[in-house]
Image: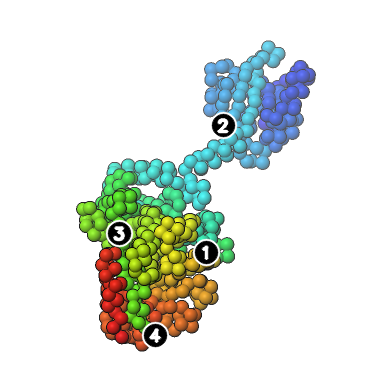
């Protein structure tokens, strides 16, 4: 490089103290001395920083020639009133490499005198690594480490700016809350690494369905937020449909074809809220409404939803108290042997005596217990109370009978479930062969290989096992013959119209024949009419329960029914 300048004096290296020169030559930072705008000395490290040989720089150019910034503005910054061209203590700017690339630098200068004339000694620090680290820190602060999407912090910042602009311009925008349905099952059955890969794949799919001006953020877990500037309700509905469609195609993760569906809640500004907290809360409420409507759909927020949410929160709080304060009780529905008409067992069904609401049925609070994690202590209480009651009846002279207890999916999957069953049996003294646990077909088929181990452990204890809601799930015969179950329960949806619907008759008959072939008892639930009972008996169905025989009864009333055995005459 030669800008038509003279060397402006001899190089000063020969005049430097030998020890100082050796240190400068070995330094791992760029060092230079300049006078009259030209380098009088550069060390090898500085030459390499910029892609030159030392001789190409000394006397040929000066620091300003290597900077991308405007030379005059840099000179003014650098002077700082010090009277030397590069005399400012510290100046940060952008440097230009010989190959044309650029990199950030910090130049630290100090004035000195050479041959009686002012000069500057400078140090050049390459800030590339520092800037990269700072960028990474900002990225970690503002972006989700797993998916790379904006995180809650960045989302809130963008929402603040969007609301400020929307207030000035009276412009609407939409906010969508998206949660993946049953994502926890994937983590539990296939592991968190597969779950993490799935979240990243979902994030990419969702991102491909959005506009450049939209913000797609991950709040944590499987919850995503999407903000649409300028969108009204129609635009939000269109995007919600695109997001649902984006997840329709299965995801291939670690050799597994996984189908995951989203549920979405939609709010619009300013109709559904004028601040971040209200918009997010109402979108969350609408999202849970979408889950209640069957999942894989979207719901717009309505004011009425908050009333339902308040009731849900009230039920959650009251249910925690109910478990502690003994407000729960069990009712029992008899299980009838269709060959003899004898009551050979009962199914325990929980009831809640709320101090203000009166008797609360399970369909109002079981889903709340499942969503809030209360299903485990609730289920453990039911299990312990059912075993205690069954043994108490035996101690009072009643003949032994099977006590059937429903097991919720979350309860079945908890790590200590087998131990909880063992504890309930040990605490009550009940013979394990008199306890029958009812698990749904979907429960055992989700992570079937893992669940076989749990079922086998219970079977070794002597506990009976029943497959509930059979025919509504997706059991394969290959698994069914491996499950140590002794009974199939025909779901009430196939019994309700049994005397009217030939398809229901065919399904029920197939389940009965399948059970007989596998040497399993078959129980039909929800029997309400004499015609249904006659058809089931004609199919050789083993057992039945339902309102035709008896509603679920409190313990004292079921005792009287057990003594009377009123169905023995029903041939």
Specify few, some or many for label 4: CA neighbours under 10 Å numbering under 14, 14-19, or 20 or more. Answer: some
Q: Indicate which disc, 1 or 4, sits on the residue closer to the N terminus.
A: 1
Element carrying mark 3: strand
Q: Indicate which disc, 2 or 4, sits on the residue closer to the N terminus.
A: 2
Measure the C-alpha gap from mark 3 to mark 1. Answer: 29 Å
Furthest-top residue in this view: 116
The reply, left or right, for residue 357 in relation to residue 527 is left
Measure the C-alpha gap from mark 1 to mark 2. Answer: 70 Å
> Badge 1 is on which residue?
457
Measure the C-alpha gap from mark 2 to mark 4. Answer: 89 Å
Measure the C-alpha gap from mark 1 to mark 4. Answer: 31 Å
The reply to whether the C-beta atoms of the residues labelled 3 and 1 are less than 8 Å apart is: no
> Which part of the image, by quadrant, shows the N terminus?
top right
Mark toward the viewer: 2 or 4 = 4
Q: Indicate which disc, 3 or 1, sits on the residue closer to the N terminus.
A: 3
> Badge 3 is on which residue?
329
Element carrying mark 2: strand
Classify residue 357 by image quadrant: bottom left
The reply, left or right, for residue 25 in relation to residue 74 is right
Q: Position of residue 563 (x, y in %)?
A: 29, 72
Q: Position of residue 27 (x, y in %)?
A: 71, 27
The reply to whether the C-beta atoms of the residues labelled 3 and 2 are less than 8 Å apart is: no
> Badge 4 is on which residue?
540
Mark toward the viewer: 1 or 2 = 1
Q: Position of residue 47 (x, y in %)?
A: 71, 32
């Amino acid at each position: 490089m030669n800008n038509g300048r003279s060397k402006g004096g001899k190089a000063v290296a020969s005049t430097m103290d030998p020890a100082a020169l050796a240190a400068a030559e070995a330094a791992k930072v760029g060092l230079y001395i300049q006078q009259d705008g030209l380098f009088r000395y550069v060390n090898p490290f500085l030459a390499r920083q910029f892609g030159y040989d030392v001789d190409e720089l000394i006397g040929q150019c000066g620091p300003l020639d290597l900077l991308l910034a405007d030379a005059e503005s840099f000179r003014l910054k650098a002077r700082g009133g010090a009277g030397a061209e590069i005399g400012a203590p510290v100046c940060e700017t952008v440097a230009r490499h010989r190959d044309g690339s650029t990199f950030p630098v910090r130049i630290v200068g100090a004035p000195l005198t050479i041959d009686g004339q002012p000069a500057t000694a400078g140090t050049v620090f390459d800030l590339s690594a520092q800037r990269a680290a700072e960028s990474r820190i900002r990225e970690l602060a503002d972006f989700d480490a797993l998916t790379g999407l904006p995180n809650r912090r960045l989302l809130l910042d963008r929402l603040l700016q969007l609301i400020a602009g929307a207030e000035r311009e009276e412009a609407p925008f939409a906010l969508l809350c998206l949660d993946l349905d049953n994502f926890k099952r994937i983590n539990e059955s296939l592991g968190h690494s597969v779950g993490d890969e799935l979240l990243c794949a979902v994030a990419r799919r969702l991102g491909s369905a959005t506009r450049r001006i939209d913000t797609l953020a991950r709040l944590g877990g499987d919850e995503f937020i999407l903000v649409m500037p300028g969108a009204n309700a129609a635009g939000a509905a269109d995007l919600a449909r695109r997001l649902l469609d984006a997840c329709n195609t299965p995801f291939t993760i670690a050799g597994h074809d996984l189908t995951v569906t989203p549920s979405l809640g939609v709010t619009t500004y300013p109709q559904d809220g004028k601040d971040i907290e209200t918009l997010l809360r109402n979108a969350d409420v609408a999202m849970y409404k979408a889950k209640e409507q069957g999942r894989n759909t979207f719901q717009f927020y309505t004011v009425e939803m908050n009333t339902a949410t308040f009731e849900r929160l009230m039920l959650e709080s009251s249910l925690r108290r109910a478990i502690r304060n003994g407000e729960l009780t069990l009712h029992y529905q008899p299980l009838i042997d269709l060959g003899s008409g004898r009551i050979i067992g009962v199914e325990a069904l929980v009831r809640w005596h709320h101090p203000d609401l009166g008797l609360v049925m399970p369909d109002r609070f079981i889903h709340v217990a499942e969503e809030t994690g209360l299903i485990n202590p609730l289920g453990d209480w039911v299990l312990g109370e059912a075993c205690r009651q069954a043994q108490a009846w035996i101690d009072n002279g009643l003949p032994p009978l099977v006590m059937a207890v429903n097991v919720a999916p979350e309860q079945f999957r908890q790590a200590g479930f087998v131990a909880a069953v063992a504890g309930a049996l040990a605490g009550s003294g009940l013979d394990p062969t008199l306890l029958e646990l009812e698990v749904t077909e979907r429960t055992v088929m989700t992570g079937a290989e893992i669940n076989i181990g749990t079922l086998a452990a219970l079977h070794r204890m002597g506990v009976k096992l029943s497959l509930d809601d059979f025919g509504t799930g997706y059991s394969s015969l290959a698994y069914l013959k491996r499950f140590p179950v002794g009974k199939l329960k025909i779901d009430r949806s196939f019994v309700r119209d049994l005397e009217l619907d030939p398809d229901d008759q065919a399904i029920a008959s197939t389940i009965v024949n399948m059970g007989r072939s596998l040497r399993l008892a078959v129980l039909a639930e929800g029997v309400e009419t004499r015609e249904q009972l006659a058809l089931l008996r004609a199919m050789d169905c083993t057992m039945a329960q339902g309102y035709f025989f008896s509603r679920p009864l409190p313990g004292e009333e079921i005792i009287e029914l057990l003594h009377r055995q009123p169905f023995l005459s029903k041939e």
